[in-house]
Image (cartoon, rainbow, N blue to C red):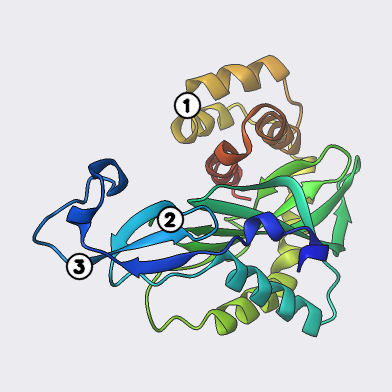
Amino acid sequence: MNELGAAEFMFEVEERTVDLKELPLQQTLGQRSDSDPGHKVILRPDTGEIIAVVRKSYRLIPNEDLIMQFYTELRDRQIPAFLDYSHSYVTNRQMRLQITIPELTFEDGDSEITLCIFLHNSYDGSEKVRIVFGATRIICTNGMVLTESLTEYSFKHQAGVNIEAIVSRAISSVFDEWPIVEDKVKLLAMTPFEVETYERVEKLMGKDWVTYLRSRKPETMWGAYNELTGYISGQLLKEDRAIHQRRVSAVFDL
């Protein structure tokens, strides 16, 4: 897998049963209880660092297992794909890994729009495992997510989850649904900017985003969409982009 450039996402993790009273309070994330044995520790054995203290019912799903399952499915289907760092990031606690599929593209008049898949995972219970579909405008690596158009798949860190089946279903669905995105983009590109959009932006994103969008004076709905996603891609930290990309998706029903 190292040749794909994903080694830093796939550091080894282990879970160990531990009595919380044996740990310093700051390492128990506020969950210390001398009488509660129902927790375990997630740690990095290479550094000895404690990543999180979670309940014993928490199922550890290593980043490596999720990534390898996705690449195996794409390889078996002979679908070209590569790890894209433009919107990927990883910390000990969370990851967001972007996989780009270059064979699924269309033109918006200015650039190619290429399908991307975002894999989300966490070791501290901060979010579920999620498979989110999006796209990148090649000319400027302007990223977007398409939660209104393409089905998102997510599951909790718990026993009984069939990761292989979920990944297979996700990949099948995106190939079926991708033409919907192209049709929506064409419609947005032909639709003059509607001032009512400012109300949706304020409701879903906040007043500062309205101020920014007004300063850009978009002529079409697609132009407005690209102004917002372009700012997110160019000005925000990678770990802050996902939530704002989701909000823009909701604003434009894309």
Cβ atoms under marks 3 and 2 closer than 8 Å: no
> Could you give the CA–CA distance between mark 3 and mark 2, rounded to whole angstroms?
20 Å
Q: Disc 3 residue type?
A: Gly
- Mark 1 lies on residue: 206
Crowd rating for badge 3 (residues with CA inside 10 Å; few <14, some 14–19, many 20+): some
Dot 3 falls on a residue whose secondary structure is loop
- Mark 3 lies on residue: 38
Say whether residue 42 is left or right of residue 166. Answer: left
Q: Nearer the viewer, mark 1 or mark 3?
A: 3
**Residue 238 point in image, percent of width and height:** 63, 39
**Residue 140 point in image, percent of width and height:** 84, 37
Q: Disc 1 residue type?
A: Gly
Foreground of the two, 230 or 88: 88
- Residue 127, label in figure: 2
Q: Nearer the viewer, mark 3 or mark 2?
A: 3
Extreme left residue here?
A: 35
Crowd rating for badge 1 (residues with CA inside 10 Å; few <14, some 14–19, many 20+): few
Foreground of the two, 154 or 50: 50
Seen at 60% across and 52% down, the residue is: 96
**Residue 13 point in image, percent of width and height:** 50, 64
Q: Nearer the viewer, mark 2 or mark 1?
A: 2
Work out whether mark 1 precedes mark 3 in sequence or the reverse, and give the earlier one: 3
> Could you give the CA–CA distance between mark 1 and mark 3, rounded to whole angstroms?
41 Å
> Could you give the CA–CA distance between mark 2 and mark 1, rounded to whole angstroms?
23 Å
Say whether residue 158 is left or right of residue 71. Answer: left
